[in-house]
C-alpha cells in the first residue's frame, strides 16, 4: 500500500534539538528529541510487519539531517491520530525519560523511541497528529516471522547462528541433549524477551501488551525487542499511606503476573504452532481458565 503524510506535518519549525529535561528530573539533556518533517526522506511503502492500529499510520523514513546522530539511518514514523493513540504516544515518551539512565539495556531489549515530530505552527497542538520517531528493526514482528514457511532457518540466519551453533542441540548445562533446533531457538528468543520484561519490572513498570505482534527481532544487534511502551503502567502511585503501600504491592503482583501470563502465551504459540490460529488459541485460553 502507498501512503502520504498529512500536509499538517509540513516543515515549519526550527531544526531538531534535544528536549530539555523536565523540572525535577536529573540534570542533563533529556533523551527525547524534537524532529521536523524536513529531517526525513519518507518512503512511499510500508512493510506489512509494521502495521499498527486503526488510529495509527506508519511510514518508513531515512534521517537526512547531517547534524543528527541518526543521519542516514532508517527509522519509523508512527502517526497517531485519535486522542487515545496520542495518549499512548505521550506515555511512550514519558517511559523513555524514566529509562534514560539505563540506555544500554533500553536500546538492547526495547523498541527505541527517539522522539517526536513537532507539529506545524499552522495547526493547534491539540488538533495535529502526534508522530513518534522510533527504531526500525526489520520489517517483521515475531508473528510474521513465525508465519514464514521457512521461519526456523530464516530466524537462525537473522540471529547469525553459525553452523556449529545450529548443529548443537544443547548440552547438560542448557537443557540436555534432547533439545531440538526449534526449542533451542525458542529458548534464545525467550531469554531475550524475559530479560526485557524483567528490565521493565525492575524499573517499576509493566508492559501490559506483550504479544507476538509487539515483539521484534533486530538483525543489527540480534536482540529481541519488546514493542513501544505506550501502554506501560507504573506499579506504584505517590500516596505514602500504609493502605496505599499495601495496594501498590498487590497491584505490582497482579501486573507482573499478567505480563508473565502473556509471555507464557508467546512461548506456547512458538512451541505449539496450532495456537497461531486465533480460534484455536481462544479454545486454549478457555481451557486454561477452567482450571483456575
Image (spheres, rainbow, N blue to C red):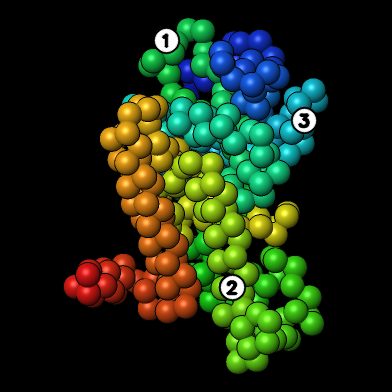
Q: CA distance from mark 3 to mark 2?
A: 34 Å
Measured from the top left, where is residue 176 in percent x and y? Answer: 63, 88
Q: Work out whether 224 lies above or below 128.
A: below
Measured from the top left, where is residue 6 in percent x and y? Answer: 47, 25
Density class for disc 1 (Cα within 10 Å; few <14, some 14-19, many ≥20) is few
Observer-side mark, 2 or 1, equals 2
Q: At x 70% / y 59%, what residue is drawn?
A: 222
Q: At x 35% / y 37%, what residue is drawn?
A: 245
- Give the number of the disc on residue 69: 3
Measured from the top left, where is residue 243 in percent x and y? Answer: 28, 35
Observer-side mark, 3 or 2, equals 2
Question: Are the two marked residues, 3 and 2, in contact with CB atoms closer than 8 angstroms?
Answer: no
Q: Work out whether 38 lies above or below 249.
A: above
Q: CA distance from mark 3 to mark 1?
A: 29 Å
Question: Looking at the rendering, which quadrant does residue 224 occupy?
Answer: bottom right
Task: Please give the residue where the numbered disc 2 appears in the rendered image.
Answer: 187
Q: Work out whether 146 lies above or below 70.
A: below
Task: Please give the residue where the numbered disc 1 appears in the rendered image.
Answer: 124
Image quadrant for the C terminus?
A: bottom left
Amino acid at each position: 500500500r502507498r501512503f502520504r503524510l498529512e500536509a499538517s506535518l509540513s516543515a515549519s519549525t526550527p531544526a531538531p534539538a534535544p528536549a530539555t529535561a523536565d523540572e525535577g528530573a536529573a540534570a542533563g539533556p533529556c533523551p527525547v528529541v524534537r524532529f521536523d518533517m524536513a529531517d526525513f526522506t519518507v518512503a512511499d511503502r510500508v512493510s506489512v510487519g509494521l502495521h499498527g492500529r486503526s488510529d495509527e499510520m506508519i511510514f518508513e523514513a531515512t534521517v537526512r539531517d547531517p547534524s543528527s546522530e541518526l543521519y542516514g539511518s532508517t527509522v519509523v514514523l508512527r502517526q497517531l491520530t485519535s486522542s487515545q493513540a496520542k495518549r499512548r504516544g505521550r506515555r511512550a515518551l514519558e517511559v523513555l525519560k524514566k529509562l534514560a539512565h539505563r540506555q544500554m539495556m533500553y536500546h538492547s531489549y526495547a523498541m527505541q523511541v527517539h522522539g517526536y515530530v513537532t507539529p506545524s505552527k499552522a495547526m493547534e497542538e491539540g488538533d495535529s497528529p502526534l508522530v513518534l520517531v522510533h527504531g526500525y528493526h526489520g520489517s517483521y514482528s515475531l508473528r510474521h516471522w513465525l508465519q514464514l514457511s521457512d521461519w526456523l532457518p530464516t530466524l537462525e540466519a537473522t540471529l547469525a547462528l553459525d553452523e556449529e551453533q545450529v548443529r548443537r542441540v544443547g548440552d547438560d548445562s542448557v537443557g540436555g541433549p534432547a533439545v531440538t533446533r526449534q526449542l533451542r531457538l525458542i529458548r534464545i528468543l525467550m531469554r531475550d524477551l524475559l530479560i526485557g520484561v524483567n528490565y521493565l519490572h525492575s524499573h517499576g513498570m509493566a508492559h501490559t501488551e506483550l504479544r507476538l505482534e509487539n515483539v521484534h527481532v533486530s538483525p543489527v544487534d540480534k536482540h529481541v525487542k519488546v514493542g513501544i511502551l505506550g501502554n506501560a503502567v507504573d506499579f506504584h502511585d505517590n500516596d505514602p499511606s500504609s493502605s496505599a503501600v499495601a495496594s501498590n504491592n498487590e497491584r505490582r503482583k497482579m501486573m507482573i503476573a499478567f505480563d508473565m501470563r502473556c509471555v507464557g502465551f508467546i512461548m506456547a504459540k512458538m512451541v505449539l504452532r496450532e495456537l497461531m490460529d486465533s480460534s484455536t488459541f481462544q479454545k486454549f485460553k478457555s481451557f486454561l481458565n477452567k482450571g483456575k
